Amino acid sequence: MLSKAEFERMARQFALLHHTAPTWAWFEPGPLSDSGAFAPPPGFLRSSPIVVQPPIAARRQGGEEEDPPVLEEPICSTADSSALDVSALDDQAQPDLLRIHICRSATYQTPQLLLLGCHGSDGRPWDVDEARAYLQRQG
């Protein structure tokens, strides 16, 4: 079991020592306007955005269903989402963005890995199948 204080200490240390892409930062959510009886939300580690190729769905001949989406390997990464410049990729499909969060489960008292992907073309979040395809592709 991992206490909240231990998780925060180790996560902050990880963020300070991890200098390769993607970079990591400790994120402390702002106070809720009226949290009432609830405790303030806990902090978590957040990666810099990782630019990945959009899902590729191969269509089969004869009207069969299409294969599940497959995501390509990451093509680059940056420490600041505002620094992402995808305008050079106008002749290609817009890349998707993946951000990774590591938080602590209060219920299980263990770290949890959250993948937050979104489509570059319209900002839509990835669905479960797209996230699964990305994980399978990574091996």
Image: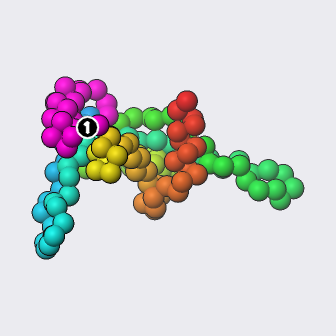
- Residue drawn at the location 19% of the way across and 43% of the way down: 4
Say which of 94 and 23 sits in front.
23
Horizontal side of residue 87 vs 59, given as left or right: left
Q: Relative to the observer, which residue lies in front, 60 or 26?
A: 26
| Position of residue 89 measured from the top left corner of the image (x, y, whole percent) | 45, 45
Q: Which quadrant of the structure image shows residue 47?
A: top left
The answer to whether 35 is drawn above or below residue 92 in the figure is below
Give x and y (percent) for residue 19: 23, 27
Is 78 situated above or below 115? above
Q: Position of residue 40 (x, y in %)?
A: 16, 60
Report the magenta stretch's main SS.
helix
| Residue 55, position as x, y percentages in the image | 57, 48
Residue under the image location 45 percent in, 35 percent down = 75
Q: How many marks?
A: 1
Q: Is residue 63 visible?
A: yes
Q: Is residue 120 visible?
A: no
Residue located beneath label 1 in the image? 2
Location of the C terminus by quadrant is top right
User: Residue at left 19%, top 26%?
Assistant: 17
- Look at 34% across and 46% down and name the residue there: 108
Identify the residue at the far right of this view: 62
Placement of the N terminus among the 4 image quadrants: top left
Name the image colouring: rainbow
Q: Amino acid at mark 1?
A: Leu
Asked if the stretch drawn in magenta spans residue 6, the answer is yes
Q: Is residue 113 left or right of residue 53?
A: left
Q: Is residue 38 magenta?
A: no
Q: Which residues are magenta?
A: 1-22
In the structure shown, which secondary structural element does the residue marked by tag 1 occupy?
Answer: loop
